[in-house]
Amino acid sequence: GNSVTQMEGPVTLSEEAFLTINCTYTATGYPSLFWYVQYPGEGLQLLLKATKADDKGSNKGFEATYRKETTSFHLEKGSVQVSDSAVYFCALSDVGGSQGNLIFGKGTKLSVKP
Amino acid sequence: GAVVSQHPSRVICKSGTSVKIECRSLDFQATTMFWYRQFPKQSLMLMATSNEGSKATYEQGVEKDKFLINHASLTLSTLTVTSAHPEDSSFYICSASGTLAGTSEQYFGPGTRLTVT
């Protein structure tokens, strides 16, 4: 079945460091891929998404590229801030471009130190 | 953006009792609501999907008689954990989707921490 694997956390970085959170997926067909962020005490928020191969999703300085050949959707940011401290979830949807059925990774906790 | 609330945020109940969790879409009409369960250091697992006015569709392995879902209006869905047991202790998260700006994005609530003693 479909699944998402993301790197184990927690990840601790200093402010302005480069961030990569790895995410790989297993799916039949052509899923849409998402990154969600959960700030402390809040619900999950959609951070970015990509709906087809080679698409790049970007938002708030974060980027991820849909790589079909490596079945990956790694999240990157060039310079993290303390306010980026949160839990990040990679997810896929196998229902076209909608989110009818989201399958999540386990989440990666990011802590950014000043 | 769209806001989804959950109530209560935390609840402690005794084994054998029932507990109800509410999920509300505050500023949009949610035609579909989803209920997830999250164990510590685990991913969110979809429990069921409910469309307003219809019976919920449960994922394989989820007991529909134990986890009662009602989606009676376009802004409210409830999850009732009946005859709760300690193994039902978990973090329950709802999400809602509607027809905002032509998308079907899911908007998530902040979650409810259930502890069964």
Image (cartoon, coloured by chain):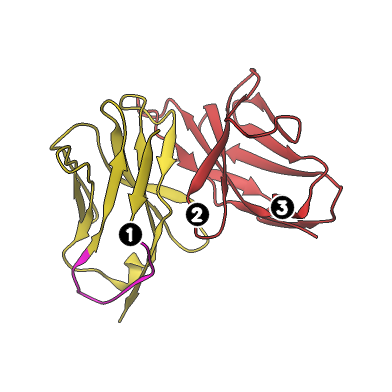
Chain colours: A yellow, B red
Q: Amino acid at mark 3?
A: Glu
Chain of residue at mark 3: B
- State the residue lying farthest toward the bottom: A114
| Residue occupying image coordinates x 20% and y 58% | A76
Label of residue B87 in the image: 3
On the image, which quarter does residue B26 sit in? top right
B37 up-or-down from B98: above or below? below
Q: CA distance from mark 1 to mark 2?
A: 12 Å
Q: Is disc 2 placed on a helix, strand or loop?
A: loop
- Looking at the rendered structure, whether the residues under marks 3 and 2 are on a common chain is answered as yes
The image position of residue B6, as x and y in percent, is: 62, 47
Quarter of the image where the C terminus of chain A is located: bottom left
Q: Are marks 3 and 1 on the same chain?
A: no
Secondary structure beneath label 3: helix
Asked whether residue B3 appears in the rendered view, the answer is no
- Which residue corresponds to mark 1? A7
Q: Give yes or no for residue A3 being in the magenta stretch.
A: no
Mark 2 burial class by Cα count in 10 Å: few <14, some 14-19, many 20+: few
Residue at disc 1, secondary structure: loop
Q: Is residue B45 above or below residue B65?
A: below
